[in-house]
Image (cartoon, rainbow, N blue to C red):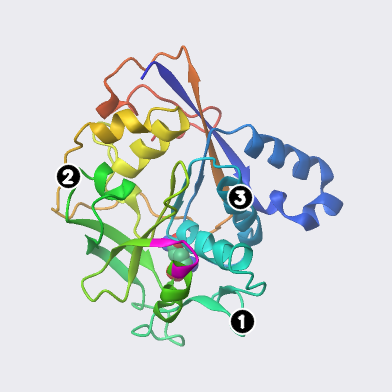
């Protein structure tokens, strides 16, 4: 790859319009970081702090054709963003953040109990079936017909709204075995815009990175076509324990800059080896 990965953490609440007045310097800094990035990763989270900023990051990436990977809440905000901006459903939201929304594109999973939060999370390894093999995510997973990835969520894309979202151009390329639970979204006409309801980071390892992370980094450095041509091996279906859990703040947006002339000289299939995160001590 000959690239050195630079990760910048952007507090998503600083991207919000309210921050322009309240904390103008932080707002300016956050937008500068986002606009300087070659790729954007919106991770998972719980609670509404910073969610509007995550939605703004998704809008930016979609409109500017900047590679985007949304994980769990990062996928849900991409759906909300699409409903608001493309389908013109201004008040579209998740019922997690606006229980009275007129356009609930993300809803509480029917099998969970709202009053009893304990043991209501959809957790652990679940199967995702790919519905189209010409989508980027299936190719990244080595043209697999199904994959097993780990989960941690209470809300899901509203299956009743899926036909409308699809008609407007959002592809649901991975679903669970019932076909009613959405697992992977893609924007077909975008350089790389993928959202996953599951958490690829739980099974990703330094020497065996998740195909979705590889895809994001390859797209951010203009090497996605090359990566897609190579056959990536399918991630093992054996469940492995999570490496870390989400911290619940739901505020960060991660931006990615794969600079040229870096030290990572490994082959594309292990390109995350040798990459580093600046300032945070976080290694992918
Ligand atoms: N892990 C997550 O990102 C969870 C997303 C969202 N809060 C849910 O419960 O569905």
Query: What residue sits right under mark 3 in the picture?
Result: 57
Q: Mark 3 Cα within 10 Å, few/some/many (few <14, many 20+)?
A: many
Q: Earlier in the sequence, mark 3 or mark 1?
A: 3
Q: In whole angstroms, how far apart are the C-alphas of marks 1 and 2?
A: 39 Å
Are the residues flagged by discs 1 and 2 in contact, CB closer than 8 Å? no
| Disc 1 secondary structure class | loop
> Residue 196 is drawn in which quadrant?
bottom left
Looking at the rendering, the stretch of residues picked out in magenta corresponds to 167-171
Labelled disc at residue 101: 1
Quadrant location of ligand 1? bottom left
Labelled disc at residue 234: 2
Residue 25 appears in view: yes
Q: In whole angstroms, how far apart are the C-alphas of marks 3 and 2?
A: 30 Å
Task: Report the front residue among 195 and 191.
Answer: 191
Task: Report the front residue among 277 and 87.
Answer: 87
Residue drawn 39% across the image and 61% down it: 171
> Residue 223 is drawn in which quadrant?
top left
Residue drawn 26% across the image and 63% down it: 124
């Amino acid at each position: 790859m000959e690239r050195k990965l630079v990760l910048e953490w952007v507090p998503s609440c600083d991207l919000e319009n309210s921050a322009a007045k309240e904390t103008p310097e932080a707002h300016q800094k956050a937008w500068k970081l986002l606009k300087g990035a070659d790729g954007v990763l919106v991770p998972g989270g719980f609670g509404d702090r910073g969610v509007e900023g995550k939605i703004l990051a998704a809008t930016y990436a979609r409109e500017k054709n900047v590679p985007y990977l949304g994980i769990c809440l990062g996928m849900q905000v991409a759906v909300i963003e699409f409903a608001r901006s493309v389908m013109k459903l201004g008040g579209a939201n998740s019922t997690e953040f606006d229980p009275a929304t007129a356009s609930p594109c993300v809803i509480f999973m029917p099998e969970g109990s709202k009053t009893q939060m304990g043991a209501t999370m959809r957790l652990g390894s679940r199967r995702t079936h790919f519905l189209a093999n010409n989508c980027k995510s299936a190719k990244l997973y080595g043209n697999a017909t199904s994959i097993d990835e780990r989960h941690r969520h209470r809300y899901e894309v509203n299956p009743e709204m899926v036909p409308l979202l699809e008609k407007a151009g959002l592809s649901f390329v991975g679903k669970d075995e019932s076909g009613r639970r959405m697992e992977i979204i893609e924007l077909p006409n975008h350089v790389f815009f993928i959202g996953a309801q599951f958490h690829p980071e739980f099974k990703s390892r330094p020497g065996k990175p998740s195909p979705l992370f590889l895809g994001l980094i390859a797209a951010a450095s203009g090497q996605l076509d090359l990566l897609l041509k190579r056959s990536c091996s399918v991630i093992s279906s054996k469940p492995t324990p999570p490496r870390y859990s989400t911290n619940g703040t739901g505020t960060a947006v991660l931006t990615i800059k794969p600079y040229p002339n870096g030290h990572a000289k490994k082959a594309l299939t292990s390109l995350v080896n040798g990459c580093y995160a600046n300032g945070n001590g976080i290694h992918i």
